[in-house]
Every structure is written in C-alpha cells, then in structure tokens.
Image (tube, rainbow, N blue to C red):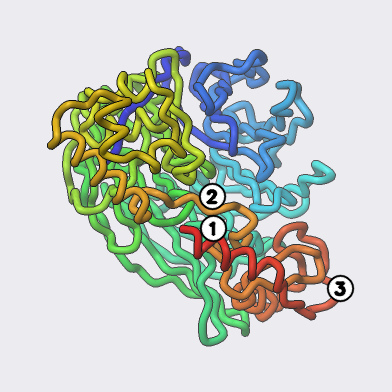
C-alpha cells in the first residue's frame, strides 16, 4: 500500500520540482526559493530557505553524494549550493542568459547539464565549474533532462515533443521525434543497466502534454549505434502528465498530472497500482528517495506530500486511495522506515508500525509497555504473549504468531547491506570482482561496462589503468553467509 505520511506547506507559490539525496529533500518554487528538509523527520534545516534566485526556480537536483544542490531559474542561472552550510558555491550563467528550465547531475557528479527556453544546452564540468560543451535544438524549449546510469549519455526532452540522446561531447546520438504530441514535460532513466549480445540497454520514462506516460528501452551497441523502442504507453491519467520518476530499485514509476492525481505503476509490467488524489491542483513534481521507501509530490496547491510505499504493493491494481488510508499521520513529522531493515534490527517504533500494517493496532500499547523490539518480536511464543503481554484472546495470540512466522520467513525482510550490492546494477552480487579502481562489482556488469569501450571507473570516472578483474572471494563468502541467514 501507499501511505500519506506528511504534508509540507512552506512554499508561497507553485511547487515546481522535488529532489532527494540520501538524507535531504529539496523543493523549489515559483516563490523564488529552494527549501531543504531532513528526511529523518522532515523538519526544515536551519539554513533553509535558500534565496539566491531573482525569479522563480524551475528545477533542483542533488549531486550523487548529496554534498551539493543545483537549482535553475528564469533568471538565466544555475546556482550550486553547499548542503552543509547553505552557502552559494558557484553561479553558472547559461549561454545567452535565457531562462533555465531544467538541470541534472551525472551519476558521478562530474558533469551538470542545463537546458534553457531557447533550446540551448550547457554541459558543465562540475569539478571546475566551467562550461564544457554547448548544444542546441532550434525553435523549442528544453524542459526535461536525465543522465543514463552509466553517466556517459543523457537524454533531453523539449516542448517540440522529441527525445534526443547525447554523449558527453554533445554529439547527438539519436533523435526520437513526436514522442509526445504537444510536447514532452519530463523524462527520467531507470537505475539499472541491462546488457546482452554486445548491447547495453536502459529504461527511460517520459511524459507529456498528450496525457500519457511512456516507458522506453534505450539501447547502445558496442559499435556506438543507438535506438529507442517503446515498451508501454500508460494512460492512467486524464490530462497532461507533468512529472515522472523511477524508484531507487527501478520497480515502480510514479507520475503527476494536471488532473490533480498521482499514479503509481509497476514499471516492468506497465500496470497501474494506485491512484492518489490528495492534491488540490496540478501535480507538477515527483521524486523517489534513493535510500528509503518514500516519494514526494509537489503541486500548484503550494504543498509537498510525502508518501511511503509499504511492502506488498503489488496485487492492488488501479486502487484509488483516499487520504484516510495513511498508516501514520506523522505527528511531529516523525518517519519510520522499518521495511528497509532486518527484523532483528527493528526498534520498538518499527514493531509498532508493523503491528498497524498488519491490522493489530490494538496491541501497540501492549508491545510498547513491554519494550518489544525486533529481536524480541521474532522470539515471541504463545506463553510470553499470554503471561507477559497479557493477551487473553487465543485467536489473537495465534494471529500474532502467524504474522511473526511470515515475517521470519522473509516476507517483509528485504534489507540488503549496501556493500553487497553492485554499484552499477544495485543488485545483490553473485560473482563479485575487484576492478582497477579498487571497487567491487558484479562480474557481468563491469565486463559489460568495459565492453562499451568505457575505460573509466563507474565510481570515480577516472581512467581504469587495466581491465583486469580480480575475484573478491572474501566478499562472495560474506554474501553467501548473509543469504543463508535470511
């Protein structure tokens, strides 16, 4: 299920964009400000709001590590902020000083691209904060941009309705015309790199004024040729779709529309899971957190809603959720994220959240009074439920134990230590190898990376001195032990 856990009401005008780092949420608005929130409790950080723009702010994005935030505006600039202090690190003046509508960091933060209302593009070397390359598409406005997960290409979308793929030298690799009648409004790449038969594949989502959300496969062969293939056309919204975003694992796709709805889709199947109706005006922005099961939506109603995706989201196709379905009101903006942890690591609050999800709200106070955390939860017996927690109902005790057994079987335990995930695919590694940059990757993923004639490190973007890969047997054994314990 999807729960509305928090509503932020600090902006004084339309919310135009939302962006997450692992620990922060940024929102920007026509009120000329950028606001920053701590994702632990959604309190505003001390230096927020950021007020360096002279006109409305159209877009904002975090660098990969979350150390920097970029925001672009009608004032013709892209401002780079320090997320530690809120101070301005650099002001990047777009060529021609036309209103800048979109900006995006590459996954390794080595580049930043900005797109303007006159169809021009600026590709910036972010380390030196200097303009690296420029490009343009005549007679249009650049409104959308996203880098591939490998960081070697990016796609742009315009009001002309086309999607164009570029490399880092601003060579146009492919142009897909008329993708959205009346214009593209947003586009984003999924997080995974798929490979096979000498070709690398990426998933791309785009949305537009034609009221559709589309999912594409973007392919690039070893020879350098590129193509796009349409996989799904999603029609769950009745008016222009203004924003879209993939979840961190690529399994979900969310979109916001002029019809005031937010839709959540299964990205692989293209099936509608939920329609959310809590905004009062156009939904202009959406973004998934990279580290927690959360997403944010921004609207012309001046609010930002924070949503939580619970486990077991599949199997509820097209269900429309009223606001009352929220599991928590998040009083004080407190957020629980137990679904990302191993059960044994759950806090007492996480246990309380799980009880609510399973329809056992009446037991929350019993468990809280007895300080039941995750480790205690999986050790419960009929005897302890009766004698220590004073649960008299035999049926209720049986239900609790049945739910605990499901939990122990792994139904809700999905947390994977980050060091066991391949940095390229973000999947649990089966055959980890160490590359010349010192990082460990899934063998197939790094081999495919190198096979595309990309001799730079996926993590540092520096040249790989050798393509030799060394098996990481220690890590493979550790992953094996972790899998056995689940």
Q: Which mark is drawn over residue 9?
A: none
Is disc 2 surrounded by few (<14), some (14 to 19) or many (20+) residues within 10 Å?
Answer: many
**Which quarter shows the N terminus?**
top left
State which mark lies toward you, 1 or 3: 3
The residue shown at (26%, 25%) is 363
User: Label 1 to label 2, Cα distance in Å?
Assistant: 6 Å
State which mark lies toward you, 3 or 2: 3
Instruction: Identify the mark nearer the N-term, 3 or 2.
Output: 2
Q: Are marks 1 and 3 in contact (CB under 8 Å)?
A: no
**Viewer-closest of 2 and 269:** 2
Residue 337 image position (x, y, % from top left): 45, 35
Eyeballing the image, is 208 above or below 13?
A: below
Would you name the residue on which mark 2 appears?
Answer: 145
Would you name the residue on which mark 3 appears?
Answer: 465
Residue 449 seen? yes
Residue 188 image position (x, y, % from top left): 47, 52
Would you name the residue on which mark 1 appears?
Answer: 155
Is disc 1 surrounded by few (<14), some (14 to 19) or many (20+) residues within 10 Å?
Answer: many
Residue 246 image position (x, y, % from top left): 43, 50
């Amino acid at each position: 299920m999807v729960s509305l856990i928090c509503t932020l009401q600090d902006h004084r005008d339309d919310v135009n964009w939302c962006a997450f780092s692992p620990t922060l949420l940024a929102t920007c608005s026509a009120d000329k400000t950028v606001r920053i929130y701590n994702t632990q409790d959604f309190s505003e950080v001390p230096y927020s709001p950021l007020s360096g723009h002279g006109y409305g702010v159209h877009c904002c994005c975090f660098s990969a590590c979350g150390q920097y935030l970029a925001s672009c505006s009608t004032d013709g600039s892209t401002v780079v902020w320090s997320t530690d202090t809120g101070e301005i690190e650099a002001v990047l003046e777009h060529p021609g000083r036309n209103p800048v509508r979109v900006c995006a960091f590459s996954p390794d933060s080595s580049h930043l691209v900005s797109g303007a209302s006159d169809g021009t593009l600026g590709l910036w070397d972010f380390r030196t904060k200097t303009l690296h390359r420029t490009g343009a598409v005549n007679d249009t406005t650049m409104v959308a941009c996203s880098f591939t997960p490998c960081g070697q290409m990016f796609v742009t979308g315009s009001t002309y309705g086309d999607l164009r793929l570029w490399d880092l030298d601003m060579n146009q690799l492919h142009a897909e015309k008329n993708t959205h009648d009346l214009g593209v409004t947003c586009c984003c790449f999924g997080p995974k790199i798929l490979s096979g038969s000498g070709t690398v594949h990426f998933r791309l989502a785009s949305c537009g004024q034609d009221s559709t959300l589309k999912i594409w496969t973007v392919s690039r062969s070893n020879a350098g040729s590129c193509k796009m293939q349409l996989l799904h056309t999603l029609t769950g919204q009745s008016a222009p779709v203004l924003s879209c975003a993939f979840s961190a694992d690529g399994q979900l796709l969310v979109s916001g529309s002029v019809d005031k709805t937010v839709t959540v889709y299964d990205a692989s199947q293209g099936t509608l899971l939920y329609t959310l109706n809590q905004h009062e005006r156009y939904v202009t922005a959406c973004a998934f957190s990279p580290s927690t099961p959360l997403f944010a939506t921004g609207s012309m109603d001046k609010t930002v809603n924070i949503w939580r995706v619970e486990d077991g989201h599949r199997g509820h196709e097209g269900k429309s959720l009223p606001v009352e379905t929220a599991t928590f009101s998040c009083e004080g903006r407190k957020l629980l994220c137990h679904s990302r942890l191993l059960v044994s690591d759950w806090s007492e609050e996480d246990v309380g959240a799980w009880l609510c999800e399973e329809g056992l709200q009446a037991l929350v106070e019993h468990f809280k009074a007895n300080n039941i955390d995750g480790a205690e939860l999986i050790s419960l017996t009929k005897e302890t439920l009766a004698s220590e927690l004073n649960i008299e109902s035999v049926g209720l005790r049986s239900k609790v134990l049945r739910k605990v057994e499901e939990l122990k079987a792994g139904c809700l335990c999905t947390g994977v230590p980050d060091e066991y995930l391949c940095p390229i695919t973000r999947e649990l590694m089966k055959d980890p190898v160490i590359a010349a940059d010192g990082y460990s990757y899934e063998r197939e993923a790094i081999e495919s990376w190198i096979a595309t004639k990309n001799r730079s490190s996926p993590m540092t973007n520096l040249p790989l001195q050798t393509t030799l890969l060394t098996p990481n047997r220690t890590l493979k054994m550790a992953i094996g032990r972790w899998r056995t314990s689940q």
